[in-house]
Amino acid sequence: MKLTIPVICLALCTLSLPIFAEEIVPAEVADKVIPTEISEPPYQVGQLPSQQGYYIERPGQTSINFRIVDNKIRIYWIDADGLIAEPESTAGNARLNGQPKIRSYFNLEPISAAAGLGGEGIVRPPHYFHVALYLEQSEDGAGDLHTFRYLISMDAPIESEEPNSTWTD
């Protein structure tokens, strides 16, 4: 009998603990609202961009989005929620190889909205080439080099499709 009362008290305390426990959520996470409507360019930090261009995935970091909008190069940093993040670079350059008679070198500078980098020159269509993208990460000129193939199909935004109710798995 002496052991029964402490066991019952312990069981009641254990069962009531989840009721009174509150999950502590940081204020910035609780207040973060993710927009669902796609914004129009020029983008600002925190807006939801259309899905287009080439994405460079970097584990544990923001991804880099290279796109051509209105025949101009634009570079954006995209966070894990798919929103425009603060630029991680203030300068860079892009070299486009594959088409004769096009300008192949573009200097990249911050764009007016300060949400990314952009090139001032016009990239004439068709947009089909190998890209060597260099982004400076510090004042001393050290940076990252990314190479990839840009295709014509990457110019258009990807429309998100709702699954058809007749589709089966």
Image (cartoon, helix red, strand yellow):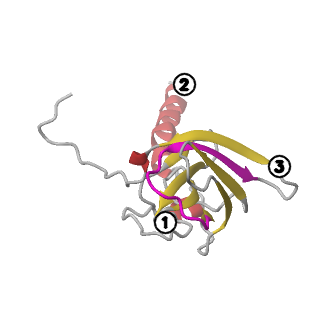
Q: Is residue 81 above or below residue 111?
A: above
| Residue 25 horizontal/vertical position (percent) | 56, 56
| Comes first in the chain, label 2 or label 1 | 2
| Comes first in the chain, label 2 or label 3 | 2
Please check the rendered image and state whether residue 129 is part of the magenta-colored stretch, yes or no. yes
What span is in magenta?
Answer: 119-136
At x 45%, y 48%, the residue is 19
> How many labels sit on residues?
3
Q: Which corner quadrant holds the C terminus?
A: top left
Please check the rendered image and state whether residue 133 is part of the magenta-colored stretch, yes or no. yes
| Residue 141 horizontal/vertical position (percent) | 84, 53
Question: Which numbered disc covers residue 142?
Answer: 3
Q: Nearer the viewer, residue 23 or 169?
A: 169
Residue named by callout 2: 3
Residue named by callout 1: 47
User: Element type at marker 1?
Assistant: loop
Residue lying farthest right? 140
| Residue 54 horizontal/vertical position (percent) | 51, 46
Packing grade of label 3 (10 A; few <14, some 14-19, many >=20) is: few
The amino acid type, in three-letter code, at marker 3 is: Ala
